[in-house]
Image: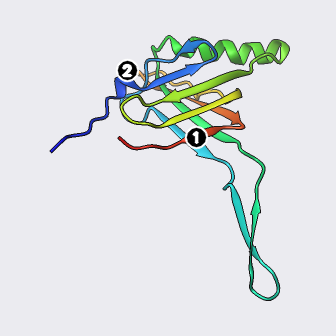
Amino acid sequence: MTYKHFDPNQLSVVLGLSPISGFAEDTMITIEYEDAPYKLSHDIHGNPIRSRVNKNTAKITIILTQNSKSNDVLSNYVELDRVNDAGIFPVIIKDPSGTSLFSCEHAFVLETPKVEYGQEAKNREWVISASNMSQYVGGY
């Protein structure tokens, strides 16, 4: 019997030209599409009508530790957007342990993280809006 494996250290996340690292211990990344690719409706006779939704946007949440240098990368994109609307970047997320791949050419930081300080290091949750996202959710 051959065992398959997942190694979170092998997950590759690149925003622009910057590899992202310093992920939180539990959930590192979530990817949620805003709309289903098709909507189903029916005519007055009950016949199904499948309509394509031509929006392909996704919300990517990247959860980093407080001391991750990648917080600087994301903060720089936010500042570029604030100063001159230039905070747009491509995204590539790949799981080399399997075959999953997500990518887009145009993304931006939609929400900056809530900042907390305490006795222990806290996480930072960055929400990114990605347009025209392509996906391949594969196995191992």
Structural distance between the alpha carbons of marks 1 and 2: 39 Å
40 or 58, which lies in front?
A: 40
Q: Name the residue located 76 percent from the left edge and 55 percent from the top edge.
A: 53
- Classify residue 76 by image quadrant: top right
Q: Is residue 86 left or right of residue 110?
A: right
Where disc 2 sits, the SS reads: loop
* Quadrant (top left/top right/bottom left/bottom right) for the N terminus: top left
Q: How far from the left and from the top, in percent, is residue 25? A: 36, 29
Q: Is residue 124 left or right of residue 27?
A: right
Q: How many labels were placed on the picture?
A: 2
Residue 37 in the image: above or below residue 41: above
Q: How far from the left and from the top, in percent, is residue 77? A: 69, 16
Residue 83 in the image: above or below residue 38: above
Circle 2 residue: 119
* Quadrant (top left/top right/bottom left/bottom right) for the C terminus: top left
Identity, as a three-letter code, of the amino acid under mark 1: Gln
The circle drawn on residue 135 is 1
Identity, as a three-letter code, of the amino acid under mark 2: Gln
Nearer mark to the viewer, of 1 and 2: 1
The circle drawn on residue 127 is none
Residue 112 in the image: above or below residue 20: below
Where disc 1 sits, the SS reads: strand
